[in-house]
């Protein structure tokens, strides 16, 4: 939840699961009720903005406010739903704070799907998917976004590549310095569904590099002469994609 | 100091002030000695990589190791000094963690100078310049960089603009959505010394926007249709600059 200031109207925005429609009632879970009524001191009659990633943004009114629950009623739609370009981010989980950061940034950068993968050199053995979802939702609440990227269950990179649909291109950001500049690679290949693949801090293994080189839908690219941390590389690659092929044009 | 893993050779890298030359002796301060000898358990004879932002990178050997002090001796230069393009980042300080993040990312993105400014809507009243420097140095140590951006003392944005040298262009990233896409603005104007200006979470004031619009060397630009947090905007703008005009080409 958008506990940390927020940008824009100053109104509280809340990402919810429920469908949003005229007079729809939205039940709050315990965390949402605590946030709205205890932290933010909202009360029956208060106006809140709701979005669910499907039905646009709605102005809603607090109907019931309890310590552990609450009900809002949708009054009117304030924005129609928008979807960003068809861009995914595949990343190897990092330490907790940097993984949180990637979830937040992927949301701000307009990713539709966030896919954590384990690679040969990934240090982290587990991923808290709920935590990633919460960070992405919080970024959407604070930045006035209407969509929150879907977070998939973590999987092995090899399995992900085995099951890949080749109509989606993969921008393989190799910190080893192989590949032409990312902007040039993207401009030459052009638009359509894409995914950006960022490796772990330890880089890709030779086996992974070798396999990616054989895949006709995977395109190796460079992110400049300096080695970037993986979280920086994620923001940089998504920026270049949006700038060259996405909705920043 | 690079306490958190590091990328590349696995060798410990340390950013120091002292000049580096054949057989130069480098005295460690208390923090550096604690890090090298207590945290990293290095001892006389251990090999460490040193850089100072001027003399390239040097392989050095521990000559004396104490709890609060130590001496290293430069043995041979391992890399000659490189400087990135002439790019500065001007930013309004944010909460502590996000300001730390900006210092780290500005270093990875190859900025030469980091200029914290206070604006009409800046929430933070003070900036810890030593902390910013330490974060930038740590990023350089971990990412194998040879230069650390200079961090200037904080100043008012108005005073900075009063004293600006007009041969350096300013990319004014206006979260209000004014301006053409940043990549197009940069491609049209072209290379030379530049600075990127990122506003505070609350955005620029109307007065600031008005003044920037009158400055012939300031160019307003957009970073896409979604509102970005200031730290995200900093990485995105630096990425586009490096990709269009800098050393990522």
Image (cartoon, coloured by chain):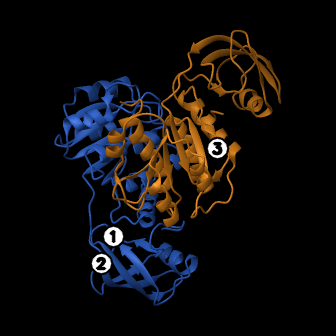
Chain colours: A orange, B blue
Which chain is disc 1 placed on? B
Q: Quadrant of residue A121?
A: bottom right
Q: Do the residues labelled 2 and 1 touch (CB within 8 Å)?
A: yes
Looking at the picture, do discs 2 and 1 lie on one chain?
yes
Residue at image location 45% in from the left, 51% down from the top: A172
**x, y percent for residue B159:** 28, 39
* Label 2: which secondary element: loop
Q: In which quarter of the image is residue A37?
A: top right
**x, y percent for residue B97:** 53, 49
Q: Nearer the viewer, mark 3 or mark 1?
A: 3
Rendered image: mark on residue B20 = 2
Tell me the residue that label 3 is attached to. Answer: A132
Q: Residues within 10 Å of mark 2 (few under 14, many from 20)?
A: many
Which chain is disc 2 placed on? B
Residue at image location 50% in from the left, 61% down from the top: A204
* Label 1: which secondary element: loop
Looking at the picture, do discs 2 and 3 lie on one chain?
no
* Label 3: which secondary element: helix
Q: As rendered, which of B140 and A36 lies closer to the eye?
A: B140
N-terminal of the pair, mark 2 or mark 1, is 2
- In three-dimensional space, the C-alpha distance between marks 2 and 3, rounded to whole angstroms, equals 44 Å
Tell me the residue that label 1 is attached to. Answer: B52
Q: In this view, does B249 lie to the left or right of A14?
A: left
- In three-dimensional space, the C-alpha distance between marks 3 and 1, rounded to whole angstroms, equals 38 Å
Looking at the picture, do discs 3 and 1 lie on one chain?
no
């Amino acid at each position: 939840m958008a506990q940390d200031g927020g940008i824009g109207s100053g109104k509280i925005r809340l990402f919810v699961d429920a469908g949003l429609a005229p007079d729809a009632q939205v039940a709050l879970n315990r965390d949402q009720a605590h946030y709205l009524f205890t932290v933010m001191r909202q009360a029956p009659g208060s106006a809140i903005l709701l979005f669910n990633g499907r039905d646009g943004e709605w102005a809603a009114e607090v109907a019931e406010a309890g310590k552990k629950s609450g009900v809002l009623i949708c009054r009117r739609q304030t924005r129609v739903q928008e979807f960003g370009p068809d861009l995914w981010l595949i990343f190897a989980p990092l330490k907790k704070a940097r993984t949180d950061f990637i979830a937040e940034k992927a949301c701000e950068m307009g990713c539709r799907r966030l896919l954590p993968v384990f690679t040969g050199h990934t240090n982290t053995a587990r991923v808290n998917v709920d935590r990633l979802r919460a960070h992405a939702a919080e970024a959407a609440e604070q930045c006035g976004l209407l969509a929150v990227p879907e977070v998939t269950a973590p999987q092995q990179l090899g399995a992900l590549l085995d099951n890949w649909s080749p109509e989606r291109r993969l921008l393989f950001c190799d910190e080893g310095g192989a590949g032409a500049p990312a902007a040039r690679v993207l401009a030459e290949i052009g638009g359509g569904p894409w995914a950006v693949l960022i490796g772990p801090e330890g880089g890709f293994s030779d086996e992974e590099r070798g396999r990616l080189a054989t895949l006709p839908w995977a395109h190796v690219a460079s992110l400049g002469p300096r080695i970037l941390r993986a979280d920086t590389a994620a923001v940089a690659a998504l920026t270049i994609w949006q700038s060259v092929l996405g909705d920043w044009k």
